[in-house]
Amino acid sequence: MKIQFKTIDPNTIKVEDIDLFVCAVGYESRSTYSLQKLRRAGLSDSKLLIFAFQDCDTDECARNNFLSIGIASDSCQKVPYSDSSIGTNKFESEVLRLQSEKIDKGITILVDYSSMPRSLYCKLLEKVFSLRRRDDVFCFSYSHGDYSGTQQAQTAGIDRIGLYSGTPLLDSAGVRSHVIGLGYDSERSKALYSFLDPQNLFVCFSYPKGNETLRQNLYEINDDVLQAASHITHLYVDDFESMIAKLTEIVLDLRKAGTVILVPDGPKPAILAFSILPLIIQANGVTCLKIYRHETAYHRANVIPDKRISGFLVEQF
């Protein structure tokens, strides 16, 4: 079965058609934006699957977000930041329950991954690959944050690096190419470049289409890595379909000369595209790494929504 994606505006999905809305409420203000919008439009609380994190009662921003939606964190599904199994198992059980209730009819699931950790939102999408029936609708939506005043993020550092997806070639001749996503943590990007020591460096900037100010900011703070790059391109985070298509073209072209290693960073849609690409391409010698941050060095930023939502449908043929 082949997977493909279709960029859509999640606002076009009718509230009355939604069987389940999945989201995570955390310390970011944007984590409640889509949830509150849908509830105001009439979405029943019985159709909600809300993930909350272990620190939701001790983090002031998270407590305020739960107060704003009027839902107790104890009524939500508690999940750890670093382990996706509890969240994905709960998601699977809810989808299977709905499918059993609508055996001859498709279901509609809307997943807002704006404030989910990578360990969760990537695994939820992978789970959809095996759960989706022909007439089911699975939409992943992303509430964009307001980064207008951002110049340089405090670095999250690097704790360790592991393999996330793909099949490496341990004995491979040819060029070793790294495709690296760049964001606002330029210090970590520089450290990654030094550690990985790529033979061929391909860098990708990710930003919403038409946001030239954000693009320019990203170029300026990542100048050191740019100087070492053989190739530079951009990805539009509000068009997931085009991101997948562009990354596929880049990776397959680089694969002709040797192995390709994807190193994701930047906005969540770009990280998601990088992470699942080896599963879509299914070519030996194409892998994606997972960069584990230093928890002691990580500084949380309360990202507020800029009121734009983008998304994509998961399709199979």
Image (cartoon, rainbow, N blue to C red):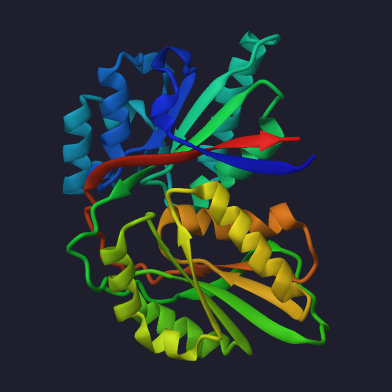
**At 52% from the left edge and 33% from the top edge, which residue is drawn?**
139
* Residue 153 placement, left or right of 294: left
Image quadrant holding the N terminus, namely top right
Looking at the picture, how far across and down is residue 268, in whole percent? Answer: 43, 54
Image quadrant holding the C terminus, namely top right
Q: Does 291 sit above or below residue 121?
A: below
Q: Depth check: 166 or 1 in front?
A: 1
Residue 208 at least partly seen:
yes
Q: Depth check: 83 or 124 in front?
A: 124
Q: Which quadrant of the structure image shows residue 162? A: bottom right
Q: Does 84 sit above or below residue 108?
A: below
**At 41% from the left edge and 41% from the top edge, which residue is drawn?**
310
Q: Depth check: 229 or 16 in front?
A: 229
Looking at the picture, how far across and down is residue 78, in whole percent? Answer: 40, 37
**At 26% from the left edge and 65% from the top edge, which residue is drawn?**
213
**At 57% from the left edge and 90% from the top edge, which residue is drawn?**
197
Looking at the picture, how far across and down is residue 167, in whole percent? Answer: 76, 66
Looking at the picture, how far across and down is residue 241, in whole percent? Answer: 56, 47
Residue 83 at least partly seen:
no
Q: Does 232 sit above or below residue 81?
A: below
Q: Which quadrant of the structure image shows residue 31? A: top left
Q: Depth check: 19 or 251 in front?
A: 251
